[in-house]
Every structure is written in C-alpha cells, then in structure tokens.
Amino acid sequence: MVAGLVYGGILGHQFIFNWDDSAYVVENEAVRGVTPDHVRAAFSSFYVGNYAPVHIVSYMLDYSIWGLRPYGYLLTNILLHASNGLLFYVLLVRLHLGKVGALFAALLFLVHPVQVETVAWVAERKNLLAMLFFLISLLLYTMYGDHGERQRRGGKIFYGASLAAFAMAVLSKSVAVVLLPTLLLYDICFLPAGEWRRRLIEKIPYLLIVVGTVIVTCISQAGESSGGMRTYHGGSPFVTFLTMLPVLAEYLRMLVWPSHLSVVYMPDLKQQVDGTVAGAAILLILVSCAGVYLFRRQRPLFFWFALFWIGLVPVSQIIPIATLMNDRYLYFPLLGAAAMAGCGVTAGWSSTSTGKGKGILLACAGLLVLSLAVAAQQRTDVWQDEISLWSDAAHKEPECHVAWFGLGDAQLSRGATEKGVQALNRALVIDPTYGNALHRLALFYMERGELLTARPYLQRLVSHWPGDIYGLTALAANYYLAGDLPGAAVYYTQALALQPDSAPILTYLGHVNLGLRQLEPARRYYLDALKIGGSRGEIEYSLACVEALAGRPATAIDYLEAALADGFTDLVRIRNNRELVSLWGKPEFLALQGRTGREEGTIGAKGRQ
C-alpha cells in the first residue's frame, strides 16, 4: 500500500526511449511474448552490455499481458519493490530486530528518494529482480542456518532453494554476487563463535556461481559487447581512488539528506589530494573506526553496517565501469543503512518505559518516513518522460554533457528542433569530442537533406574516434548520398576493416563500386554479403545489374528471377534502371511480367519507347 501511494503516479509515465527502455523493451523483438525462441535469445544474448536473462524474460511476461503499454511494466516494478520491502521486513523480524524497528526500516527502504530511479525506470527492473531473489536466498539461508536444521531434510531443502534463488538473482543482475560475502558475514555475526569456520565448505557452490557470474559479466561488459567496462577514470587507479573517496562520502550525505538527486552525476576527477579528498578520507576513517567498534561490541548491528559497504563494492570502481555515481547504486546498500536506522528505533523503543516516550518516538519516526515519502513522490514526477528527466538533469548538472545530450535528443525526437540543436551544441561545448552528440546532430541534418552541414560533425567524430563504426558508416553514407562515390568508398572500406562480417557494409561497398563501374569488386562484395546473410532480394537485384553491365544477360536474368523469388518488389526500379538496358529486349526479361502480374504493366516497355 505504501509503495502504491508513493509510486502510483508513475503509472501515467512513458518509456524513457533514449535511456535503455528502447533497447530492453520497445525495440527488442525477444520480449514480444513468451516463446521458446525468445527465451533462447534471452539466455544466449547480451542486452546493453548485460547478461540478465531473467530480466528479459520478465519483460516477455509483461508484453503478454500489456503489450507495449508502459503502465503495465511500471506496475510490475511497483509490485516488485513492494515485495522487496515485505521480504526485508520478514528478514529483519527473523533476525530479531523487533517489529517496530523492522517496520521502520522496511518503510525507509520503500520510500527513500534514492529508490525512485530503480522503481520509476522500466530498464532498471533488473535491480528489483536481483533484490527479490537476493532476499529470498538470504532468508532461506537463515532458515537453513537455524540450529539443527542443517542435518534435517527440511534444512537441506532450504539450502538448495537458497542456491537456486541466488542463481536467479545473478541472472537478473550481477550485483547480486554480494550475497556470498553477506552469507559469510551472517555466519560471523549471528551464529555461535567459531561456527562460521565449519560452514565455509557450504559456501563453495555459492562461490562457483560467483566465479561464473564474474566471468560472464567481464565478457558482457567489454567494449565489443557494448558494455560499461572502461579504463580507470582519469587514466589511473590512483585518480579513480581519489575521486571515489568524495563519491562515497556523498552517498552517506544522500542517505541522510537526499537532495539534488539526478539521473546523471559528474563528480570532479581528483588528480591529487585536496581539501575535499582529505575531508572525505577523514570521514570514512571515522566511519571505519565505528565499524571496528561495532564488530567488537555489537555483531548483529555490525552485520547491517557492513552490508551497506558490501553493497557498494561492485560500484566502487575497483573494476572500472562507465559511471562513477548513480542513485540506483544505493538500492542494495540501503538494506544495511535502513536496518541500522531500524536498530536505532528498536533501541529507543526498548529504553523508553512510558507510553508518552514511545508515542514521541513513533511520531518522530513517522514524520521522517512521511517526509521521505513526499520527497520520493515528488521525485517520481521527474521520470514522466525524456524531456522532464533530462531537463532536471541539465538543471542540476549543467556541466554534464550527457545530460545536455539526453535533453537535445529528446527534444529533436519530439520535434523541438531549435531547442534540440541548442542542447546538443551545449553538450559539444562541454566536450567537443562527445561522439553521441556529434552523431545525433549529423543524423539530424542528414535527415533534412543538409549533407554538407552534417559532414563536419561526422568528420570530427571519426577524427577523434577512428574506431567508431557508426560514425564511419554515417560519414560514408553522407558522401554516398552526396554523389561522392570515391569518398564513400574510403570510409566504407575503413568500416569494413573494423567489421569485416557486416553484410550492410559489404552491400554498400558493392553499390559504390557498381556506381563507379568497377564491376569485379562490386560482384565480390555482393557475393560476400550474400554468404554472410544480407538482404537477398536487394543483393540479387544488384548482382543482376552487375552482370547486365558486364555483358552476361543470362546470368543477369537468373539473378533477377532469384531477386523476385526472394521478395524484391520494386518493379519500377527494374523497369527504369538503365543499368539493365541490355536486357530490355530479351524474351526472358519480358517473360518476368508473368511472375509479377499484368497489373504492373510490361516490364521494360517504357524503356523501349
């Protein structure tokens, strides 16, 4: 109910088309219904650099019910978040937090404003699913860990079910690997002294799942898989380390005072120790000292303290990823932070003997939850669509090129061309080499037929990013459309060197060489494209043109027949293309009209007149 009140407004929101919703849902054929082929695709493919097949399958279920209506997907997100809050409450009670403290902690987890990004963004469903199975696995493990259960049949069932839930969690999002250290921490903090050593062997199956997940994640996150793995920010681990100290301190601030939240952040890269880095380091040292104290004196409380930091490990840039900081990175750590707050409420409840004191405590806790809930509900408005989301980001992070690109792209898509161009150029003022903005502006001008206006953007793009296959092919297309075939050949050839198995690039190289009347190279490119699996009808038609120009009419007719059989339907091109002029008087060419229907007229008649 609480989740519904806070997040119910998102049911009227739209997909965020330029922030992964298109790639995961709208343009993803694999989610359009639950079929064996779609399930196979989910388990055998990477999506946006992630291997998360359970995440993709969940969209299939949504599509089967809602089609592509966004409110259905967002309703599922709300229900998953509410389920996570309920499971968290059950776990807290089971670990003896007390019902009042557990309720407070669960409500904090549900309504804290940093959770909005995970709930209101369809593409971040993976966070919700990973948490669902993470909590189920942890809860089952605690049941297995009960005294006497380990040797009973029921206990073994709990253990096996916990493993299965863990597998589902990492197949939803790899961040769930933090379950393994969480289980070790549970054994140390909640079981009798020394018991954790005897249970290490039971962690081996969990460890194997973690190792497999890490290997697959490294592959999926690599650049060639369009993933988010990058070199260290600032060019070195030391710069990344210095930069992350203020980021970690900022996360602590966001928990206590969740203001200035944004979909993107631009933390300053720290090349050396300054006042901000030193202050953050001192704060983190003090927090660490508090952790040591809790470990010695309050093991159960230390469990939740450590869980917060364990949840941050995957996004702490030890293995560098694309973004330094995000609200969604706090979804898992918030378990520990909320539980610690719940422990505080439990302690206050236990130490207060009067009804008045308990009432004041409940009023203060309720006021805090209410304040956070209102802030979260207001934050949900930002996620209404791309314009509102990126306008908010550009306002809060005015020096973030990603925010201005997102806003400009959204405005161009909505037809606000002047504002869109201004926003994209603002992104380029901040970062003149930003490839996404260069590419988007170039495509915008090309769509308007302003090829020469578009070309400098593409030239700058390929100059700074020579390995950008999309930039190379766009620049080649620019030259091709402008009639500069030699220029197109240069850039298509460079693109082919980067992606030699690309049927579209091979096909366009065939078109360029055909236009230049270099028939043998054109034939070779077309045949290679056919072998790879290019558009058969189009390529066979082009091969017919090559053979007709080469003086092989019989072969040309054969290719035309194959093209028609493979779905080529542009009879006007056949009728008017002077590359086929040598065929127009051939009986075999005239006979093709029987294949296409008399309503199309006599093929080649116009050309002979």
Image (cartoon, rainbow, N blue to C red):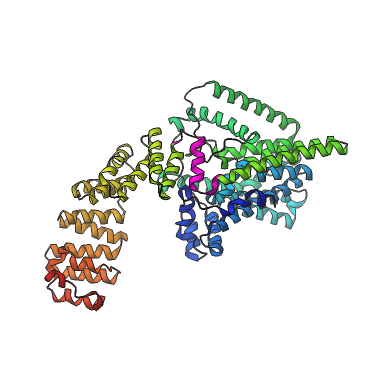
For residue 348, above or below residue 86: above
Residue at the spot 67% in from the left edge and 50% down from the top edge: 5
The C terminus - image quarter: bottom left
For residue 528, above or below residue 478: below
Q: What count of labels does the image hold?
A: 0
In which image quadrant can residue 100 be found? top right
Residue at the spot 31% in from the left edge and 40% down from the top edge: 457
Q: Is residue 234 left or right of residue 210?
A: left
The picture places residue 541, in percent across and down from the top left corner, at 23, 65
The picture places residue 384, in percent across and down from the top left corner, at 54, 49
Q: Is residue 162 left or right of residue 506?
A: right
Query: Is 247 within the magenta?
Result: no
Q: Can residue 179 be seen at all in this image of the molecule?
A: no
- Where are the magenta residues, as a range? 382-400
Foreground pick, 322 / 310: 322
Query: Is 396 within the magenta?
Result: yes
* Extreme-right residue of the structure: 354
Foreground pick, 345 / 523: 345
Q: Can residue 162 be seen at all in this image of the molecule?
A: yes
The picture places residue 209, in percent across and down from the top left corner, at 57, 49
Residue at the spot 49% in from the left edge and 26% down from the top edge: 270
The picture places residue 190, in percent across and down from the top left corner, at 74, 41
Q: Is residue 551 left or right of residue 506?
A: left
Residue at the spot 59% in from the left edge and 23% down from the top edge: 279
Q: What secondary structure predominates along the stretch shown in magenta?
A: helix
For residue 169, above or below residue 457: below
